[in-house]
Image (tube, rainbow, N blue to C red):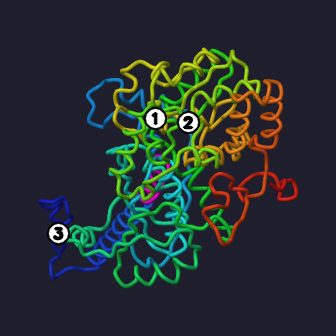
Amino acid sequence: MCSVEGLGRKGGIRMGVMKAGGGGGGERVEKLKSSRMKLWMIRATTSVLLWTCIVQLTALGETWGPRVLKGWPSCFSHQDSSVSVIEDRVPSVPARVLPPKRVYKNNGYLMVSCNGGLNQMRAAICDMVTIARYLNVTLIVPELDKTSFWADPSEFQDIFDVDHFITSLRDEVRILKELPPRLKRRVEMGLVHSMPPVSWSDISYYHQQILPLIQKYKVVHLNRTDARLANNGQPLDIQKLRCRVNFNALRFTSQIEELGKRVIKLLRQNGPFIVLHLRYEMDMLAFSGCTQGCNNEEVEELTRMRYAYPWWKEKIINSDLKRKDGLCPLTPEETALTLKALDIDTSYQIYIAAGEIYGGERRMASLSAAYPKLVRKETLLEASDLRFFQNHSSQMAALDYLVSLESDIFIPTYDGNMAKVVEGHRRFLGFKRTILLDRRLLVELIDQYNGGSLNWDEFSAAVKETHESRKGQPTKRLVTPDRPKEEDYFYANPEECLQPSYGQLSST
């Protein structure tokens, strides 16, 4: 006889089989084994399906998550309408396709500390990403300069969209927000090899000199990163990657982007506008030693400031000689004459992309009289709009950068880092009109006009003729192998990344 005890305490089937069983008992045992096998198969199949779903959801989460979930209410929200809000938003959000991760043997970690203002650091970041990529190392999100004249405490993520920066380049290089814990502790203890790389070096220098150090120490810290990769003579892939970082990966934060769009919209409502990068600011004048039009007290103040910064190596400067060599930013008075000579319409808005002009209203009087529609971000926006940007010069410069890209004409009065990087970005956007002033010839013409040796018509004609070929048209970069500081800057004219073929480029 056989007996079935039924379901046990945990729901399992318990069977009791009498020793004296017959043929019917054997059949029941076989059925029991068959049912157990089926149950096992069902459980195994279910597990496989569940794991497949989890893997698929993880992949989708990586693709959709950062973009979709950013605007969704918290899962712990007590709002009744949260589900309907999510359902309404899903169809309108485009799928974000991330590039596949590049798989490579990691040779170590590269830390970098950028120096200078926003655009000097911007170019350095592009170079350091490129170097990390070709050394097969992991790059730590760059540290920004906090000790320069501007003393801006902004971190990378305060200016740039750090998540976009990391994910948009994941098919080229692995970028982390910070070192792994073990290596981070070593750095905090001061156990890190730190050095400035040699300026204007090509990629072979980094392979031969820097890579062995990274492999030896696991972490290397490059503490000065401006102008460390050569402008010319680099493989095309390297030049293309520098452009990709600059024009795609380095996107400003949403807060900066939105405020920039608002400024541009306000300007567009009132017609065409020109961005004048008037680099007549205290730091530039002190650094360059240019004191044209300054009174004695101002000259003394600028000189004291120059001596206060030990890394500004040039101390004794002949301002008049430097001006005649074209090495000084144009003064506001010289700028007013130049714009009038170029027949810039006085009804145009002139957006001043700069910090505080040295000398204030006294020095701006002639420019304001010639062009009454002078505006700044501070005059277009409410004080509350700029509250979060106060005392953060790089974030303010980022706003000016965005407006400069969208202007009808961009005119820099000095060829500093912002002028050069904006020039190159406008070339990339379709060779948007950028008037590159020939300061050396301009000050000579201005002095002749002010001295009476040229009348207005002669002066204006000479200024127009000089700048006919200096409007941001396609040109070849000037290459000076033995004097890299004197050759054309890659980021001012990244010709390898621009649309016209080399046959369409003119020689300058």
Q: Nearer the viewer, mark 3 or mark 1?
A: 1
Q: Is residue 210 above or below residue 232?
A: below
- Residue at the farthest right position: 503
Write the start and end of the magenta stretch as one range. 53-65
State the residue position of label 3: 3
Q: Nearer the viewer, mark 1 or mark 2?
A: 2
**Mark 1 or mark 2: whose residue is earlier in sequence:** 1
Of the residues shown, which amino acid type is indicated by label 2? Leu
State the residue position of label 2: 402
How crowded is the residue under tag 1: few (<14 C-alpha within 10 Å), some, or many (20+)? many
Taking 243 as reference, is 255 left or right? left
Pick the front one: 128 or 473: 473
- The structure residue drawn at horizontal position 43% and vertical position 62%, both measured from the top left corner, is 175
**Mark 3 or mark 2: whose residue is earlier in sequence:** 3
The image shows residue 173 at horizontal and vertical percentages of 50, 66
- The structure residue drawn at horizontal position 51% and vertical position 42%, both measured from the top left corner, is 290
Label placed on residue 256: 1
**To which quarter of the image does residue 477 belong?**
bottom right
Taking 233 as reference, is 29 left or right? left
**Quadrant of the drawing holding the N terminus:** bottom left
